Image (tube, rainbow, N blue to C red):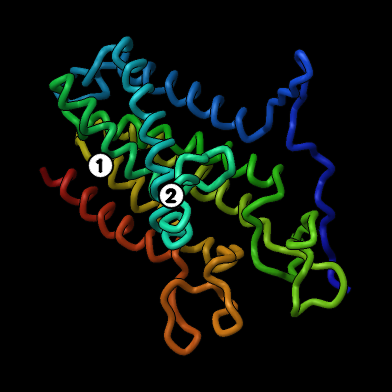
Amino acid sequence: MHAMIPFPDISPELFSISVFGMEFALRWYALAYIAGIVIGWRLVVASVRRPDLWPDRTAPMDPRAVEDLLTWVILGVILGGRLGYVLFYQPGYYIANPGEILAVWQGGMAFHGGLLGVVVAVLVFSMRRGIRWLSVADALCMVTPVGLLLGRIANFINAELWGRPTDLPWGVIFPGRAAQDCAEVVGLCARHPSQLYEAALEGLLLGAVLLWLGWRRGALRAPGTLTGVFFAGYGAARFLVEFVRQPDAQFVSPGNPLGLAVHIDGYGLTMGQLLSLPMIAFGIAMALWARRA
């Protein structure tokens, strides 16, 4: 029998209280969002207080403007993430049930959609303020991995978005019948902790590279460099992890057990990989252009 790691007994809720018969709870996932936004905000504020980091020794905005940017970013994440999930993952269902498109409390957010929402938010914010949008984008891309790191850890605590079955010694036995039901495995089913793989790659590693480039290597003085590195780095990390991540249920069928969005004779790409390829191409092109501009 292969070594397996039991899922740690961590409640998805930090605490819950009852007020006038109504139950309120603070969940790890909500805390991850809040902490990621606050830490990212403070890092951006710290960077704009260092004019020597920016082109012509001039920060693109003052610290007070960062608060206004934060509002735009939050709207972009929520609206873009939800619409991305609707359009990329379950368009047929939501065409038939349009009333549920705004029901974000039922779950269903797509990172690629949220990213597009933030891009639109940055463009609108920058045009309204008359500032260089690429520098604003660089500032956000430099700190976004903080939120990704915390969010993926919260995914693990919530026992969601787990990976494919594995017999590797660090395979985790996630709770719930869906996680433990593996047709190809007899007995308990261990799975890749793909949430932690993503936390390490797109959160910790990518974040360390971006902060090092921005604060130590002068990358913020070449607008677009960190934006390009982020897009290429996130796309590459997501593309790799998709090989061991459990595919979305709507793509799985008897003839397509790997859940590939496009495939020929059993070979192809998952939806996550399909959406990551243009990110990688755009990121590389952006970083090269920024360094030559």
Amino acid found under the numbered disc labelled 2 = Pro
Q: How many marks?
A: 2
At which x and y percent is residue 181?
77, 69
Q: Which mark is residue 1?
A: none
Outermost residue toward the top?
64
At which x and y percent is residue 29?
62, 35
At which x and y percent is residue 225?
25, 42
Residue shown at 27% from the left, 24% from the top: 53
As rendered, which of 89 and 169 lies closer to the eye? Answer: 89
Label 1: element kind? helix
Question: Is residue 23 toward the left or the right of residue 30 in the image?
Answer: right
Amino acid found under the numbered disc labelled 1 = Thr
The image shows residue 128, relative to residue 178, as above or below, that is above
Q: CA distance from mark 2 to mark 1?
A: 39 Å
- To which residue does mark 2 refer? 98
Residue shown at 77% from the left, 56% from the top: 174
At which x and y percent is residue 261?
45, 71
Q: Quadrant of residue 74?
A: top left
Quick one: label 1, few (<14), some, or many (20+) residues within 10 Å?
many
The image shows residue 269, relative to residue 57, as above or below, that is below
- Looking at the rendering, in which quadrant would you find the C terminus? top left
The image shows residue 284, relative to residue 291, as above or below, that is below
Label 2: element kind? helix
Q: Nearer the viewer, mark 2 or mark 1?
A: 2
The answer to whether residue 218 of the structure is visible from this angle is no
- To which residue does mark 1 refer? 225
